[in-house]
Image (cartoon, coloured by chain):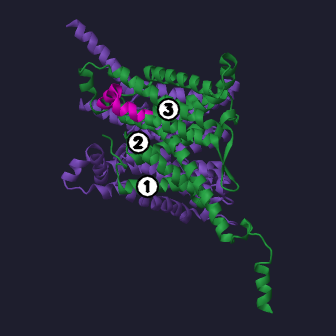
Amino acid sequence: MSAIKTAMKTSKGLFVLASFAALALYPAVAGNYGVDLVTKVMIYAIFALSLELLVGMTGLVCFGQAAFFGIGAYAAVLLSPQAEAASLLWLLPAAVVAAAAYAMAVGALSLRTKGVYFIMVTLAFAQMAYYVVHDTPLGGGTDGIYLTAKPVLGSLIDLDKPLPMYAFTLVCLVLVFGFLALLSRSRFGRALAGIRVNEQRMRATGFSTYPYKLAAFTLSGGLAGLAGFLFAVKDAFVNPELMSWHFSGAVLIMIILGGLGHLRGALIGAFAFALLQEFFKSEAIFGAFAKHWSLGLGLTIIVAVALLPRGLVDMPGQWRARLVGRRAGVSGGAR
Amino acid sequence: MLGATSGCSLRQPGHILTIADFGQETRTLLMDLATFFIQCLNSLQYGLLLFLVASGLTLIFGIMGVINLAHGSFYMIGAYMAYALAPIVGSTFGGGFFATLLVGAVLAVLLGYVLEWVFFSYLYQREHLQQVLMTYGLILVFEELRSLLVGDDVHGIQPPAILSGSLPLGEMMTYPVYRLFISAVCLVLALGMYFVFTRTRLGMMIRAGSTNREMVQSLGIDIKFLYRVVFAAGVALAVLAGMVAAPVSSVYPGMGNTVLIICFVVVVIGGIGSIRGALLAALLIGVVDTFGKVLLPQAAGVLVYVLMALILLWKPDGLFKAG
């Protein structure tokens, strides 16, 4: 039995490694459009991972994650000097810290509530951020605002070109994934898992759970800010829609679709969601009907959840269970 | 000499007193009172309308435990029904606005009944997050079906002739009769709901079913049918709200989503599952939103959410806990 478990663990590790290797080799075979698309999807994946830290690891369902994403993006644009390119060295941390700071304030207040109320309070704080950029001239209002010069790191990295942008995003994705994988195995990660399973018992064993939850919330906000930063740099443009609740909803869909409680679920979910969207939007396949792409997307989501309640990650598990079940049925019949 | 001229300009001999002679301050005060009154009526109308949609949401939430993101879509469907059904109803029954309302309500009950049967009844056993996902998928489906059937244009709708007038208010202000009609309809429906819940056998069974599903079932009550009725009623309320509101708000794509989020705010402020709480919260939001738009237009969008955050920080379970 333990041999099977080790084999499964290795296969999961191999899957992740193989995915990252495939992503690293991808630009060699893809055109400009493909590189741009996958860069976007990788940014979504980082965003999804940031939410996975909250929902999957800690059991806190946040419905306002887009606010932190948006703050990271707006910080990248607003803090950049107008005429010259900013240095990545300070602009990236600044964007992450800005998002984390807002997350800390939001978390400090909203962690007083629980369950559905927590979902709604996080939504409320996200809507506040949304209306601040939507209704005030701070960030260019509804029109959004352009990033005039993309940040650089000396002459080493110039994010204005698609390939360095792709590589930089991939490195960020791998680092975030590795960081969260280590985190979940650390004492801190175990404490978060304990809070998810039974917060009452964690408190009884002497853990003060509030600081742990607040730390997770702040960290998650910072990571979402990183994703937002990358997004702003890639598109050189931000608008209030980055903070809308639709986006918060979409990223939640990604991690649920992928499978909660697994880091690779966030990866799979982000890719599945974005590629499904591209698939149904494709005029080559659907012709004039491609205009109604969300019909196909909506139906797919419904069917996917109905058939795979534990997400795409669980697909091999379900097949195995079906196979084992059939075998067990056969042996039972022989007896 | 100086004193004489200033006295002259104030009151000339033989002058008749008119409203123009009152000081500017008194006149603005009168105007302000009228404006204030109008805004109060607007708040009431908006609040009651929100209550109609939110009450269905909180019922379905509180009794069946389903987070239904697609509830806003029913409001949207209602508004589009008011637009698309009117010519059909007009040509078959020869009736106008009220016949359309009636036909729409019947269709809404049917829609809710069938939807519960083929879709939502499978959600009861699922986790909340899966419900969120599946009903989100449903939003996309409804929006696209609407786009396929009716198109993506914005439509204005005329209120019926009897209700299209305005009541005079003070010297120069008027108030549209139709908005009063909306408030009246909502009020009647709210009272009707209160009556059904507290005074009838059906209401008793529904309340019992929300407390303990198994117990009610073992007493020989068909809980599945009961749920279907509650769901159909919730859908009908949202559809009716959409139909009644259409002449004021006009009909446009994505209108359901805006309403959905505000209604979730109402449900959460009021306390999940509490009809009383939903009513209070809806009125509160009506006031805050309407006056916010007049007094602080820059911050109007934020105010509702600030209110919600403050209330939840004060009372983490909403104003009225369900029960």
Q: Please, is residue B251 above or below residue A307 in the view?
A: below
Residue B219 percent across, percent down from the top left: 24, 21
**How much space separates mark 3 and mark 1, taking CA atoms?**
27 Å
Q: Which of the chains bears the disc numbered 2?
A: A
Residue A7 percent across, percent down from the top left: 32, 32
- Chain A's shade in the image? purple
Which of the two discs, 1 and 2, sits closer to the camera? 1
Identify the disc placed on residue A263: 2
Residue drawn at (42%, 60%) of the image: A104
Sequence order check, earlier mark of 3 and 1: 3
Left or right of A317 on screen, residue B106: right
Q: Please, is residue B290 above or below residue A5 in the view?
A: below
Q: Provide the residue span drawn in magenta.
A: B192-208
Residue drawn at (28%, 51%) of the image: A191
Q: Are marks 3 and 1 in contact (CB under 8 Å)?
A: no
Q: Amino acid at mark 1?
A: Ala
Residue drawn at (38%, 42%) of the image: B272
Label 3 CA crowd tier, 10 Å (few <14, some 14–19, many 20+): many
Report the residue marked by disc 1.
B309
Describe the element under mark 2 as helix, strand or loop: helix
Report the residue marked by disc 3.
B237
Q: Amino acid at mark 3?
A: Leu
Describe the element under mark 1 as helix, strand or loop: helix
Residue A318 percent across, percent down from the top left: 37, 24
Q: Which of the chains bears the disc numbered 1?
A: B
